[in-house]
Image (cartoon, rainbow, N blue to C red):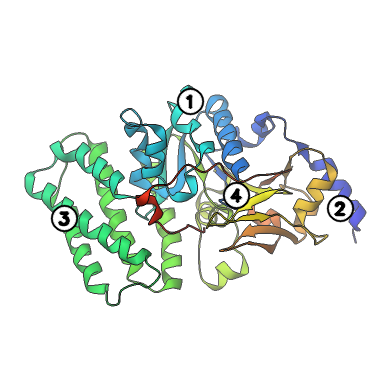
């Protein structure tokens, strides 16, 4: 039986101090998909470090597609809009509240990122402004009847969205959801874009995601969680075909990218994107979980929380103790990773310990030494109506 000293020694020997991301070279050179998780959406360093990883993967390994835990169509059209509007405005109208920070702006501003394609895998709508921009870009490609039907469907859609965001949701929204569904299904059957096939494929996927979101909201809380995970994976499958031959980076919470199931996801029959990809593309994926050893994080409501690691089995605590720097910890073939460790993950109002066998969920972990909150962009009235996102 291995003792703690042997385990600690193996971790010390395996850990690589993070000076730059060349350390990923041998792990990603033959991969088509790199999944980048995060233990919390409220860590500024995760955003800035993920962008450094993306830059390295893009410039040295040909990864051109970044898939966010964000609306598919909203993300896809964001780069087009940056030629017309300030990047800060585009970020706030095309991406969820969790991304509204200064650390995200290099992806929309810097010259090296201009050839990146940004897209998303979620079916959740974002803001009316993104919808209005997309509808105007395709107006000339639709007949008058289809254009008017689309505008009406989107108006219904966002009225429902705003109702569903309220703490006290109005009763009996089901008839309105069903009526809106009929409008999108009619568009899917009848409306056809004039022009390139790619535009038609994207338009049909946009309509399909609106339908998926409405169907999701017709279900109960547990069923909708299962369906959201399924829809995310369906979108990733579609993106792999749409951008055939391209390499993808998936950016999401650790919950969505883990390649194994925890007891709770097994109990609820939730098959996340990472888990589903492992069943179909195991050899083509490399999954990295991001964690933090000390510092502060923001809750989904942007309250500041100090990271506290009291348990001796916290893997982040051990990573902090073995190095003065952030560390990259490869897990493939490592004996220590077959043990259950405690790792902190975000919850609604705080960080909670989660006991997992890291090797079952990740190919590697990066533990950042000392982290801080994101530098949030100023909000506006439209954004204040959005609820905080958790996972």
- Mark nearer the N terminus (4 vs 1): 4
Instruction: Specify the quadrant of the image occupied by residue 133.
Output: top left
Residue 7: mark:
2
| Mark 3 residue crowding within 10 angstroms, few (<14) / some (14–19) / many (20+) | some
Q: Looking at the rendering, in which quadrant would you find the N terminus? A: bottom right
Q: Nearer the viewer, mark 4 or mark 3?
A: 3
Q: Name the residue located 14 percent from the left edge and 49 percent from the top edge.
A: 191
SS at mark 2 in the image: helix
Q: Is residue 65 left or right of residue 191?
A: right
Give the spatial CA distance, label 1 vs label 3: 37 Å
Q: Name the residue located 27 percent from the left edge and 72 percent from the top edge.
A: 173
- Mark nearer the N terminus (1 vs 3): 1
What residue does disc 1 label?
110
Above or below, 110 relative to 356: above
The x and y percentages for residue 125 are: 34, 54
What residue does disc 3 label?
152
SS at mark 3 in the image: helix
- Mark nearer the N terminus (1 vs 2): 2
The x and y percentages for residue 254 are: 58, 53
Give the spatial CA distance, label 2 vs label 4: 25 Å
Q: Nearer the viewer, residue 127 or 303?
A: 303
């Amino acid at each position: 039986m291995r003792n703690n000293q042997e385990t600690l020694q193996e971790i010390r020997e395996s850990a690589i101090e993070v000076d730059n991301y060349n350390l990923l070279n041998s792990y990603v050179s033959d991969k088509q998909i790199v999944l980048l998780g995060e233990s919390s959406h409220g860590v500024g360093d995760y955003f800035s470090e993920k962008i450094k990883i993306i830059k390295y993967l893009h410039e040295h390994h040909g990864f051109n597609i970044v898939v966010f835990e964000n609306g598919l169509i909203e993300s896809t059209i964001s780069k087009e809009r940056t030629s017309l509007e300030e990047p800060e405005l585009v970020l706030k109208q095309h991406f969820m509240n969790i991304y509204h920070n200064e650390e995200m702006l290099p992806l929309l501003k810097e010259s090296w990122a201009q050839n990146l394609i940004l897209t998303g895998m979620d079916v959740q709508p974002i803001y009316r402004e993104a919808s209005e921009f997309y509808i105007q870009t395709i107006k000339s490609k639709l007949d008058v009847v289809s254009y008017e039907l689309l505008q009406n469907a989107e108006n219904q859609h966002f009225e429902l969205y705003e109702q569903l965001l309220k703490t006290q949701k109005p009763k009996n929204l089901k008839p309105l959801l069903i009526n809106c569904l009929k409008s999108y299904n009619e568009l899917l059957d009848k409306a056809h874009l004039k022009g390139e096939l790619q535009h038609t494929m994207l338009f049909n996927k946009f309509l399909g995601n609106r339908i998926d979101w409405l169907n999701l909201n017709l279900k109960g809380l547990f069923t909708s969680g299962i369906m959201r995970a399924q829809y995310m994976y369906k979108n990733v499958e579609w993106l792999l075909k749409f951008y055939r031959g391209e390499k993808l980076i998936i950016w999401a919470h650790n919950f969505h990218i883990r390649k194994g199931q925890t007891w709770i996801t097994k109990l609820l029959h939730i098959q996340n994107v990472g888990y589903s990809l492992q069943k179909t593309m195991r050899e083509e994926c490399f999954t990295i979980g991001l964690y933090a050893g000390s510092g502060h994080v923001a809750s989904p409501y942007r309250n500041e929380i100090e990271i506290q690691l009291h348990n001796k089995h916290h893997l982040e605590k051990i990573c902090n103790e073995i190095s003065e720097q952030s560390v990259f910890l490869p897990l493939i073939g490592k004996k220590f990773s077959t043990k259950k460790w405690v790792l902190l993950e975000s919850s609604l109002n705080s960080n909670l310990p989660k006991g997992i066998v890291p090797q079952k969920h990740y190919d590697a972990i990066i533990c950042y030494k000392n982290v801080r909150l994101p530098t949030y962009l100023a909000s506006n009235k439209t954004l204040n109506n959005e609820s905080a996102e958790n996972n």
